[in-house]
Image (spheres, rainbow, N blue to C red):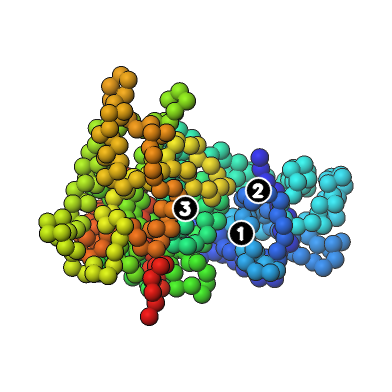
Amino acid sequence: MLAIALVHSTALMLERLPERPPAWLTRGERTFAYPHHEWRKPRVWCLAFFTDRHPRFEQRSIIGVGTVFPGRRSGTYERALIARDFTALERPLRLVDLETPMGASRRFLKHDGHMPPAAGRNLLNAVRNLRRELGDVLDGLEAGLGANAPTGEVGERLSLEKDAVGTLLETAGMDRDPLEAWQPPLGEDGPHSRSVPFLEGLPSLRQIEDQQIVHDYMRFPGMDGEDAVQVGWRIYRRSTESSHRLFVFNANRTQAEAAMGVDMIYVNEHAHSVAMVQYKRMRQSGHNWVYWHDGTGEREMKRMEAVDAECDPAWIETGRPAAGTAGDPRLVTTPSMVKLCRTEPFMMNSAALIPGMYLTREHFSELLQRPEATGPSGGTRIVEHSIPRYLNNTTFTTLLRDGWLGTRGTGSDYVIELIRRSLSSEGPGSVVVGIHRSEVPPGNRRVN
C-alpha cells in the first residue's frame, strides 16, 4: 500500500532541496536532520508533500513533492530523514485550500510524518485535482514506491545479498537500518534484471566521491588495486566520530564467485583476517527443509577446499603455526564457511537477517558423507533437523567481529591477493565483499 507523508521542511531543507543535486546523487538523494516525530509504523519510503513550515497554519503551503524515508532517532530531538526525487511546485498550494476536499481527514494537515492510509489517499487525490500539472510527477513517484518486491530467482538472490550485507554490518558493529530503506533501482531493465545488485537499491548514505576514498577502496591490506574495479561501493560508519569504517561492494558482475565459490567475503584489516561464506538454499520437501547437493555444489566445494588448503600450509605440513601468527589464535584458521538457510521471499522494509546455520567447510563436507545424506531416490542431501550443532547469526557475527574466525598470517595474504585478482575482471556471479577498516582492534583483545 502506498504510504503518504506530510513533511514540514526545516530551514536547511528549504534551502537545499530545490538546488540541483550533485551528479553522483542520481536521484537527488540527501539526508537531513529532522525534528523527531513518532512516524507511524512501518517505517517505509513515503510519497511526501513538503511544506514551507510557516508558523501559522493558515499561511502554510505545499512547496514540493518527492519521497522520504525516516531513519531512527539521531539524538534527543532529531532523526535522520532521507529525501529524494524532489520536484518543486510552480505554484505553492495552501493547506487551507485542501481542507474542504479532504473532509474529515483535514485534521491531519496539522500533523507531521506518515499519515493514516485514508488521510493519505485523500491528500493525494486533493492535490491531483487542484494541481493537475503534477499528474506525471505523481504517477512516477507512485510507480516507484508501489513496486512489488522482486520474486522468483531474482528475489531469492536479492534475499541472500541483503543477508550478506546485513551480516557484514552486524559484524562491524553497525546498525542494519539502511536495509529497511531498499527500493527497486532505476534503469537496468527494472528491479527484475539479474544484473542489478542489492546495493543499488540502497540509499546513497555514504557514496564514494573523493580521491582519498577512491584510494582506500582500491586497496586491500598490503595490495594495490586496479582501475578495472567498477564504482559500486558503499561506506558505513558506526557513528560520525567512530574510527570503524565498513567498505561494502556487491560484486555480482565479477568472477569472484566463479573463482572461489563464495557469496560473502569479510576482510578485517586490523586483524589481518579474511572469512568467506557460501550460501546454500534449502527447499521445502514435505514437512522438512532440505539442501540437495549437486554437481555445481560439488565444484564450489572443491574450489573452497583448494583455497583452504593454501591458507596455512606450514601448519598442515609441520604442525607449527605459519609466520606472523604467534600470539594470534583462531578457533577456525581456514576462511571458508557455509550458511544453510531456508528459501524465503525477498522482504522489503526489513532489516532482519535470514535465519540459518553457519558451518565450517569441513563440518559441511562431513554432513554430506553421513549415511543419512543419501536421499530415498538417490542423490545427496542434508535435512535441516539432522544437523546437531551449528553457529547461528548472533554467534557467527560475534566470533567474526572479535577475530576468532578467518585466516591469519600468510593465509590472509594469499586470499587477499586472490580476491583482488578476482575483482579486477568482469564476469558472472553474486558476491558481497566487506572491508572492515579501523585503528581499533577487534574485541576480546588486550589494548596496551
Front tag of 3 and 2: 3
Q: How crowded is mark 2: few (under 14 residues within 10 Å), some or many (20 or more)?
A: few
Q: What residue type is labelled 2?
A: Pro
Q: What residue type is labelled 1?
A: Gly
Taking the image as drawn, is residue 159 in sight? Answer: yes
Which x, y percent locates residue 232?
39, 57
Q: What residue type is labelled 3?
A: Thr
Q: Residues within 10 Å of mark 3 (few under 14, many from 20)?
A: few
Please give the count of numbered marks on the rendered protein: 3
Residue at 56% over, 38% down: 148
With 67 as the anchor, is 102 left or right in this view? Answer: right
Q: Nearer the viewer, residue 267 or 258?
A: 267
Which x, y percent locates residue 366?
27, 39
Which residue in the protein does label 2 denote? 42
Could you tell me how far apart the alpha carbons at marks 3 and 2 are, in whole angstroms? 24 Å
Which residue in the protein does label 1 denote? 71
> In which image quadrant can residue 122 be found?
top right
Which x, y percent locates residue 217?
35, 65
Direction top: furthest residue? 377
> What element does badge 3 sit on?
helix
Could you tell me how far apart the alpha carbons at marks 3 and 1 are, in whole angstroms? 24 Å
What is the quadrant of the N terminus in the image? top right
Could you tell me how far apart the alpha carbons at marks 2 and 1 are, in whole angstroms? 12 Å
Residue at 61% over, 50% down: 45
What is the quadrant of the C terminus in the image? bottom left
Which numbered disc, 3 or 1, marks the residue that appears first in the sequence? 1
Which residue in the protein does label 3 denote? 394
Please say if the residues under marks 2 and 1 sit with CB atoms less than 8 Å apart: no
Front tag of 3 and 1: 3
Which numbered disc, 3 or 2, marks the residue that appears first in the sequence? 2
> What element does badge 1 sit on?
strand
